[in-house]
Amino acid sequence: MLYELRIYTVPVGRMAALQARFRDHTCRYFANHGFRPVGFWTNAIGGANDELWYLLEWDDLASRERAWARLLSDVDWLAVREASTVEGPLVLRSVNRIMRPTEFSPLGMGGVPFVSPGA
């Protein structure tokens, strides 16, 4: 299992529009193309208030590549993305990381909480 962490830095005044695009469109397109979102976050304490973080779960890199290729070639999704940027870009920059859980991570053990042998 792999996890993809994406962090978007959003222009001033555009966070609501980006969140609306995810809520009203992106999550549906993700589901249609095999994406498995784990969650979406903004900073509550610490960090910058212009960031949207989200985590995707993948079986492997090949499934990730196929899903992204399908999404980025979906003409309906591309039209939604373009329409949402008429008033300006929604993302100034992005960070993307592919992460693999450690053997002691609850995520790496099928959701089974890790219990230390000494506990």
Image (tube, rainbow, N blue to C red):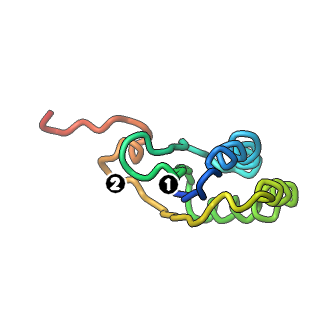
Query: Quarter-wise, where is residue 63 in the image?
Result: bottom right
Q: Nearer the viewer, residue 88 or 2?
A: 88
Q: Amino acid at mark 2?
A: Thr
Q: Secondary structure at mark 2?
A: loop
Q: Which residue does the numbered mark 2 point to in the structure image?
A: 102
**Which residue is at 24% across, 36% downward?**
115
**Which residue is at 29% across, 47% downward?**
104
**Which residue is at 59% across, 45% downward?**
37
Q: Mark 1 or mark 2, which has the lower sequence index? A: 1
Image location of residue 54, percent across then percent down: 54, 49
Q: Residues within 10 Å of mark 2 (few under 14, many from 20)?
A: few
- Give the left or right position of residue 45, taking residue 8 as reference: left
Q: Amino acid at mark 1?
A: Tyr
- Give the left or right position of residue 53, taking residue 75 as reference: left
Quadrant (top left/top right/bottom left/bottom right) for the C terminus: top left
Image location of residue 7, percent across then percent down: 52, 57
Q: Residues within 10 Å of mark 1 (few under 14, many from 20)?
A: many
**Which residue is at 83% across, 56% downward?**
83
Please tell me how many numbered marks the rendered image carries.
Answer: 2
Report, in whole angstroms, how far the alpha carbon at label 1 lies from the one at label 2: 12 Å
- Give the left or right position of residue 54, taking residue 21 as reference: left
Image location of residue 92, percent across then percent down: 60, 65
Q: Secondary structure at mark 1?
A: strand
Q: Nearer the viewer, residue 79 or 115?
A: 79
| Mark in the foreground, 1 or 2 | 1
Residue 3: image tag? 1
